[in-house]
Amino acid sequence: MKKILLITAVIATCTVVRSQNEDDALRFSMDRFSGTARSLSLSGAMGALGGDFSSIAINPAGLAVYRSSEFTFTPALQYHKSDADYYGIKSTDDKFSIPLLQIGFVGTYTPLREVTSGIISSHFSVGYNRTNSFSRRYYMEGYNIKNSLLDRFTFNANANGLDNFYSGVLYGTGLLYDYDDYPGEYYNAFEYIGYDPNGDGYIGFGPNNGVNQIRAIDESGNAGEFHIGGAINVSNKVLLGATFGVNSFNYNRDMQHYEEVSGNNYGDWYPWQYYEHNIGAEGLDNYTFEEKISTVGVGINLKVGVIYKPINSLRVGASFHTPIFYSMNEEFETFAIGNFFKVSLNDEKNEYILGPNVEAKSNKWGDFSYNFRTPFKATGSLAYIFGNRGLISVDYEYTDYSSMSFVSKGSNISDKSYFKDLNNIISNTFINTHNVRVGAEIRPTDLFTLRGGYGYYQSPYKKLFLNSDNKHQTFSGGFGYRMNNMFIDFAYMLRKEKFIYSPFNLDDVDYILPEDKAQSADITSNNHLVAITLGWRF
């Protein structure tokens, strides 16, 4: 447990200097694959089946299953709903989007003279598959909390000095300040220095009723892969394929954190207000801290795969995906605004007279470029085809998230040292995962097909880490209709995730009482996706 807390403290300290952290690494690397409606219906269990444009992204050998050329595209409707439980208060938020999940062309060439051995057919493909969607919102609120985000930044300022984008911005707003009687130390506007009966000083949290906290996160963007692929069918027994991919990444996040004093501005604030009055400061009523991040990236990778058919109804597949080598550019901005009120002491009535609110603002913008390498992936697949009446398919996927790595673009020693420390945190935080997808089809008629699927994704965090027990599952179903050379598929997928979100961590702040340490929010994320694929074979 001490190791976990130490790593958490290091992360909290590092993230106020640069915005990159281990959560970004996971976001760059983790796929929430969608693709065609057929693939969605089967929860992505397509590695040994092939014959579908999205299956190529899992196992390129699936391209050699095609018997004709084909064009497909898949628009969708996506609805994301999140439920958060923060300090016992339940909150909900949602977001709606209309993504394009895939568009692609497959070409098939067969010799004019039909053969039964050697190269039976050759194939190529070109197109796009979406691999992740970031369209979502989270909202959480808690009341009468005896800690503040300001405590986190105050601790960091005292440990490392003011930085440009976090404690420095708060200092410029007056939310953090240095007190002349204690040079070299920083305090925040919710703190006061009190004295016990022995005359020993201590740092106290000002508002007796605590503060109300609200955090809202709005995310948008997507990740996808443009690929060119080729495959061959050898003797109808061995199918071989490979793709070269150009990966795109686009992510935007707007995080707003708001705190206000619980209760009123009078006697129950006495120790805090008396301190503020003595040092000539203004009282803090509320403040907002906002962080905006925009990340775009372009990468490349290679995928190779094989499908072996020992008998006509059984298919065994395997594929390997190299890491994606990304070039990233990130822009970020921090903004703070504080609403203060003037306090004057009326000695005759021994009360505080509150003056008008005073507003203070500060912001900072910057950008940063770096390289990033995702982990490699390996997939093993098995499918059994029941003639023309149905099939069952299983995929097993292995990914080593501890191998994710940030790389500096230049020779700056500070950047290299920072990324070295961050990569050490990544290797100490994440593990390799074992994911399973299962899908089945039933064809009651030659023209109509029913489908269903389930996926289970293991947490990439090591045991005892914050999200080591998080749950990530997919439940899906759909149907398809074939008519001459055209087909149409419908699919619905529910992607259900449960995880813990920590707005900030105060475990290493020794003057915060154990019962007042910052708590985390329990979040349930439900992503509903409805897709339709239109396809033509020729």
Image: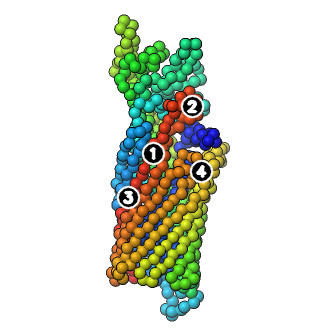
Numbered mark located on residue 462 in the image: 4
Residue 340: x and y in percent read 40, 24
C-alpha distance separating marks 2 and 4: 24 Å
Q: Is mark 4 on a helix, strand or loop?
A: loop
- Which amino acid lies under the numbered mark 4 shown in the image of this protein? Lys
Residue that badge 2 annotates: 509
Mark on residue 522? Answer: 1
Residue named by callout 3:
528
Q: Is mark 2 on a helix, strand or loop?
A: loop
Q: Which amino acid does label 2 sit on?
A: Val
Q: Mark 3, mark 1: which one is toward the viewer? A: 1
The x, y position of residue 183, in whole percent, is 58, 20
Q: Which amino acid type is marked by label 1?
A: Asp
In depth, the one of 284 and 198 nearer the eye is 198
**First-in-chain label (1 vs 4):** 4
How far apart in space, not on screen, are marks 2 and 1 (Cα)? 23 Å
Asked if disc 2 and disc 3 are in contact, CB closer than 8 Å, the reply is: no
Q: Of the two numbered discs 2 and 3 on the same chain, state the one appearing first in sequence.
A: 2
